[in-house]
Image (cartoon, rainbow, N blue to C red):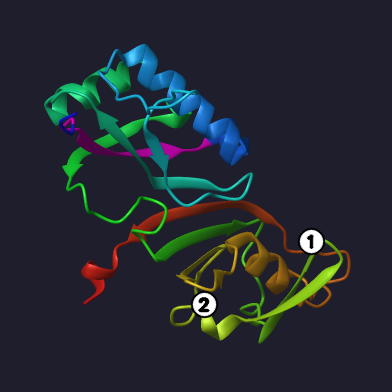
Amino acid sequence: MPEVRLFRLRVFFCKGGRLALLSHLELARALERTVRRAGLPYAVSQGFSPHMRIAFGAALPVGVGGLQECFDLSLASYVAPDKALEALVATSAEDLMPHTCNYIGSKAPAASVAYPLCAYEARFSRAPEAPLPVPETVTLTRKSKEKVLRVADYLEGEPVWDGDRLTFALWSRPTGSLRCDTLVEAMLAQQGAPAAPGGETLQLVSLTRTAQHALLNLL
């Protein structure tokens, strides 16, 4: 049987508002429904359990928004990127809105590994009296087992404060990654008592992945 040619469309979208609370599985289901409503000619896998050929980018922690999230959709026939985007926009929720579509090669890296460096912005309840220190290590506990991560292995450069906002970037390594919310929680855990009696303890208000960078863009 001759190989069927598929067209691999990479779609970038925003995830925000209440929909930032979706889990990765819930997000995947929501995006699949959006594609179906858009009427795009999506390809279907072979076998006993056919399903839409769609692959999602690196997962975000629940509650973390994203401005440059993506998924790869295999189409059985060509649709102009602007027409595909128009159809997706018409069937998408406001807090889960696509903004860019383009075709990529069949051998291009999967969306989940194509962008190893991600930028984040954390917004806090107020500006800190002094920048929060970055811990040297973070200890994770999973299934009663502890794993210690060296923050410097994942953090790109130094975090930058601008009033009540903190920006930083994290690498995803082949051996694992450091979650953005885990780093922020570790930084908050090191804050001392408020400078003024009865003052407000610094709290995280929102956390957003603002950009994802491909390795080729960094060379």
Which amino acid type corresponds to the residue marked 2 in the rendered image? Tyr
Badge 2, how many Cα within 10 Å: few under 14, some, many 20+? some
Q: Nearer the viewer, residue 110 or 152?
A: 110
What residue is drawn where x is 22% and y is 69%?
A: 216
Badge 1, how many Cα within 10 Å: few under 14, some, many 20+? few
39 sits left or right of 208 in the view: left
The residue singled out by tag 2 in the image is: 154
What residue is drawn where x is 87% and y is 66%?
A: 144
Per the model, the C-alpha gap separating discs 2 and 1 is 31 Å
Quadrant housing the C terminus: bottom left
Q: Position of residue 168 (x, y in %)?
A: 48, 70
Q: Position of residue 86 (x, y in %)?
A: 22, 21
Mark 2 or mark 1, which is nearer to you? 2
Q: Nearer the viewer, residue 158 or 77?
A: 77
From this viewpoint, which residue is outermost toward the front?
A: 1
Q: Position of residue 70 (x, y in %)?
A: 37, 43
Q: Nearer the viewer, residue 183 or 123?
A: 183
Q: Position of residue 80 (x, y in %)?
A: 11, 26
Quadrant housing the N terminus: top left
Disc 1 is placed on an element classified as loop
The residue singled out by tag 1 in the image is: 200
Mark yes or no: residue 45 visible. yes
Q: Are marks 2 and 1 in contact (CB under 8 Å)?
A: no
Q: Which residues are magenta?
A: 4-16
What residue is drawn where x is 47% and y is 54%?
A: 209
- Residue 22: image quadrant is top right
What residue is drawn where x is 55% and y is 85%?
A: 152
